[in-house]
Image (spheres, rainbow, N blue to C red):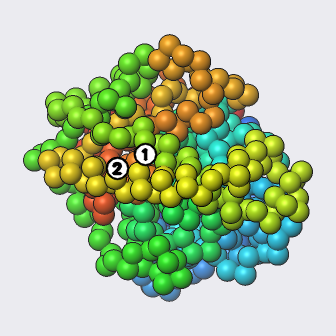
Amino acid sequence: MSFDAFTPAHLIAAQIRDGAVSCETVVTGFLDRIARVNPQVNAFTDVTAERALAQARRIDAALAAGKALGPLAGVPFAAKNLFDIAGLPTRAGSKINRERAPAPRDAVLIERLSAAGAVLVGGLNMGEYAYDFTGENAHDGACRNPHDLARMAGGSSSGSGSATAAGLAPLSLGSDTNGSIRVPSSLCGVFGLKPTYGRLPRTRSFPFCDSLDHLGPFARDVTDLAMAYDAMQAGDAHDRACAQRAVEPALPTLMQGVSGLRIAVAGGYFATDGMPEADAAVKAVAEALGATRNLALEGAGIARAAAFLITNAESAAFHLDRLRARADDFDPETRDRFLAGAMQPAAWYIQAQAARRWFHDETMRVFADVDLIIAPATPCPAPDIGQKTLSLRGETVPLRPNLGLFTQPISCIGLPVAAVPVFGAGLPIGVQVIAAPWREDLCLRAAYALQLAGVCAAKAPEKLV
């Protein structure tokens, strides 16, 4: 078997370990593809070619010396540019940050994937300071959707979704505060995993909103997603929010399927009336998983409002010095949201945290009766770049905040979610598979079952040259 840009990561690693292809050949192939395709999609802001080729040669030398290789040996991956990458300034999608000194060391999750044998090929475009759902970066340019270059990739992990979908890297890393893994996964048609809040350490990544920030992987294949997730697990004392839990591998459970699991479809706030693509995707996933029950997550709208207030307050406090000194160097869209947060009454933040706790407790009662909940990931497929409004349930609403309509309530209480892609007649759209805290294994089992059934699968873009 030979590899191409859309070969799953676990098969690439197996071929390298078997000696069927050299790591250097694989990495060179992906670097060549990045050079050719990235000008179309604008997913990469930095390409670490020299580093990648040096690591590839070390892996080939280790294999020739008879040494055991890691589970992701030779698999290229890329990381959203809010992850520290040794030797590069950590941009976080901003103009201001690119003046920072180069990072002396990689982010912990990059170190862990590298220790498993994966090869970093670069840093990825993103919304400024992660405060974005569109992928339209004012400083580095809009990241484009590989399935239609006139459309958005979604944000804020825009480069992660676009690069993975375009075959520029089999794996990528992103962050998710209010939906920034799940929105690009949905619009670009790839799998994404937002783990439980506190599951994966955020050490040496640039923060957005401390009490909501998550990090996680993107992939075109569920086995790859589980392998990357497993490689990154373990506590880290340098992230105060990171739970010091033992590693709980998800890969060995993938083939257990969904038989016996209690699966329900979220209605009420999450109803897909008037959203034909989202409705069809949710129905296809529900049918494939045998979900016949509907339930309402009471208070989801309140949780979304709470997430807005918490995000505004915490992010504004973090950026206050930059706002005072260099307000003109922000994207005006981002700056204005930070300024609004800076002027937000403290009482609102306190009430939002109380509402967050209430919604958490209400949702935990729901999980006493169900194992998984299915909900739409976005209300629509990828909008046009530059689009400002969205028709939603008969009303014209601002596009930017409403791309996260269905993701915000879930991240507000830190639940694990697998975003799974559904391709209809046209563009992809995603569905969230949601579990109780620390049950990423159930999310991934369901995603794997959907992939086996052919309901959810990443597809090679037809419109790239």
Q: Residue furthest left?
A: 260
Picture quadrant where residue 11 is located? bottom left
> Would you place residue 257 above or below residue 422 in this image?
below
Secondary element under disc 2, as helix, strand or loop, is: helix
Residue 1, percent across and down?
43, 52
- Res 102 → quadrant: bottom right
Q: Nearer the viewer, residue 85 or 413?
A: 413
* Residue 234 seen in render: no
Q: Say if 65 sits above or below 221 in the image.
A: below
How many other residues sit within 10 Å of disc 2, few (<14), some (14-19) or many (≥20)?
Answer: many
Give how far across and how far down residue 453 sits, in percent.
26, 36
Mark 1 burial class by Cα count in 10 Å: few <14, some 14-19, many 20+:
many
Report, in whole angstroms, how far the alpha carbon at label 2 lies from the one at label 1.
Answer: 6 Å
Q: To which residue does mark 1 refer?
A: 303
* Label 1: which secondary element: helix
Question: Percent x, y for residue 68?
Answer: 42, 81
Q: Residue at x 62, y 69 (%)?
A: 205
Image point (44%, 52%), residue name: 412
In the rendered view of the protein, which quadrant contains the C terminus?
top right
Q: Is residue 231 above or below residue 144?
A: below
Q: Position of residue 137 (x, y in %)?
A: 75, 44
Q: Which mark is residue 118?
A: none
| Nearest to the observer: residue 379 or residue 46 | 379
Q: Amino acid at mark 2?
A: Phe
Q: Amino acid at mark 1?
A: Ala
Horizontal arrangement in the rendering, residue 434 relative to residue 79 (left or right): left
Q: Which residue is mark 2?
A: 359
> Toward the viewer: 465 or 285?
285
- Callouts 2 and 1 close, C-beta under 8 Å: yes
